[in-house]
Image (cartoon, rainbow, N blue to C red):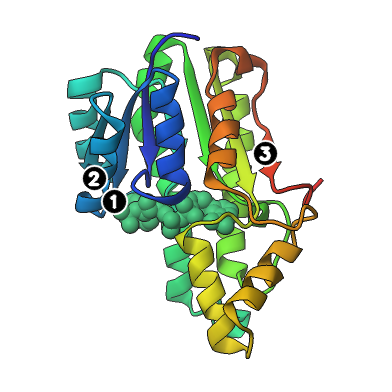
Amino acid sequence: MGLARHALVTGGGRGIGAAIAAALVAAGHRVTITGRDAARLTSVAEVLGENCQALGMDVTERTSVDAALALARQRFGAIGILVNNAGQAASAPFMKTDAAVLQDMLAVNLGGVFNCTQSVLPDMMAANWGRIVNVASTAGLRGYAYVSAYSAAKHGVIGLTRSLALELASKGITVNAVCPGYTETDIVKEAIANIMAKTARSETQARAELAKSNPQGRLVQAEEVADGVLWLASEGAISITGQAIAVAGGEVM
Ligand code: NDP
C-alpha cells in the first residue's frame, strides 16, 4: 500500500460516491465526503468509521466549497486525492430543455469540477503530488438522445480533464476521468421511473432497455467504478494522466 492521504469525495453520501469513499477508506486513506444532504452523509461516515468525515457543501457555490474544504483540512490535513463525483442528470428532448436546465447541468457537472479543483489544487501544488479523478460518463464520450444538456456538460468535463492534465504534467499531479455506463444507483432508478412514466414499459422492461446498451448486458455496479478510481488514485498510476477510462462493459471503445 502507498502513503495514506487525505481524499475528498464530492457527492459521497450515496451511489457511486459512497462506494468510492468506502474503497478509499479500505485502502487506508482519510476520507472527507461532501454533499448537500447532511443527514445522509453523516450516516455513511458513521459506517465508514474514524477515517471518514462528512461535511455539507454545494459544489456549485465556490464560497461553500472553500468553507467546507477549510474545515476538512483542519481534521485530516492537506488534500492529496480529489474525486469530483457530484453530479445530476436531467433528461428531456432537446426542444423541451430550457436554458435553466442547461445552466443547472453545466453548474453542477462542470462548474462543480471547476470549483472543487481550483479550491484543492494549492494543496497538491505545495506537495508536488496529487491525484484528481473526475467521474464523467460515457455521455462525455459519445452522444445519447434526450440528455443533450447533461452530455454537453460531461463532454466539458473530459475537455477540462485533458487540458488540466497537460498543465499539471510536470507537477506530480495527474488528472483523469472515469466514464461509467449505466450504473445501479438513484440516477438509474430515476431513469427507469422516467421510461415507465413516458412509455408503456414495465420496470423489468425499462431496466432491460438500459442494460441493453452495455455489451455485457448488465448494469455497472458502483463498486466497479470505485475500483477504477482507486487505481487512478494510487501511487503507481503516475504515468496515467489525461485519460478518460470507460467503465461500461465495452459500450465505448
Ligand atoms: P446519485 O444521484 O446517487 O448521487 C449524486 C451525488 O451527487 C449525491 O451524493 C448528491 O449529494 C451529489 N450532488 C448532486 N448535486 C450536488 C451539488 N450541487 N452539490 C454537492 N453535491 C451534489 O448519482 P450517482 O452515484 O449515480 O452519480 C455519481 C456521478 O456518476 C455523477 O457525476 C453522475 O453523473 C455519474 N454517472 C452516473 C451514472 C449512472 O448510471 N448512475 C453513469 C455515468 C455517470 P446531495 O444530494 O447530498 O447533494
Q: Residue at x 41, y 33 (%)?
A: 22
Find residue 74 and report its horizontal and vertical position in percent: 17, 22
Q: Are marks 2 and 3 in contact (CB under 8 Å)?
A: no
For badge 3, the amino acid type reads Ala
Q: How many marks?
A: 3
Residue on which disc 3 sits: 244
Most foreground residue, 202 or 167: 202
Give the spatial CA distance, label 1 vs label 2.
Answer: 18 Å
Q: Quadrant of residue 195?
A: bottom right
Q: Is residue 236 left or right of residue 173?
A: right
Residue on which disc 2 sits: 43
Most foreground residue, 111 or 209: 209
Q: Secondary structure at mark 1?
A: loop
Give the spatial CA distance, label 3 vs label 1.
Answer: 25 Å
Mark 1 / mark 2, whichever is N-terminal: 2
Q: Residue at x 69, y 56 (%)?
A: 218
Dot 3 beta carbon under 8 Å from ligand 1: no
Mark 2 / mark 3, whichever is N-terminal: 2
Q: Is residue 15 left or right of residue 91?
A: left
Q: Are marks 3 and 1 in contact (CB under 8 Å)?
A: no
Give the spatial CA distance, label 2 vs label 3.
Answer: 32 Å
For badge 1, the amino acid type reads Asp
Find residue 2 and report its horizontal and vertical position in percent: 49, 9
Q: Secondary structure at mark 2?
A: helix
Tell me if residue 120 comes above or below residue 192 in the rendering. above
Alpha-carbon neighbours of circle 1 within 10 Å: few (<14), some, or many (≥20)? many
For badge 2, the amino acid type reads Ser
Q: Is residue 81 left or right of residue 204?
A: left
Q: Report whether residue 174 is seen.
A: yes
Dot 1 beta carbon under 8 Å from ligand 1: yes
| Mark 2 vs mark 3: in front | 2
Residue on which disc 1 sits: 58
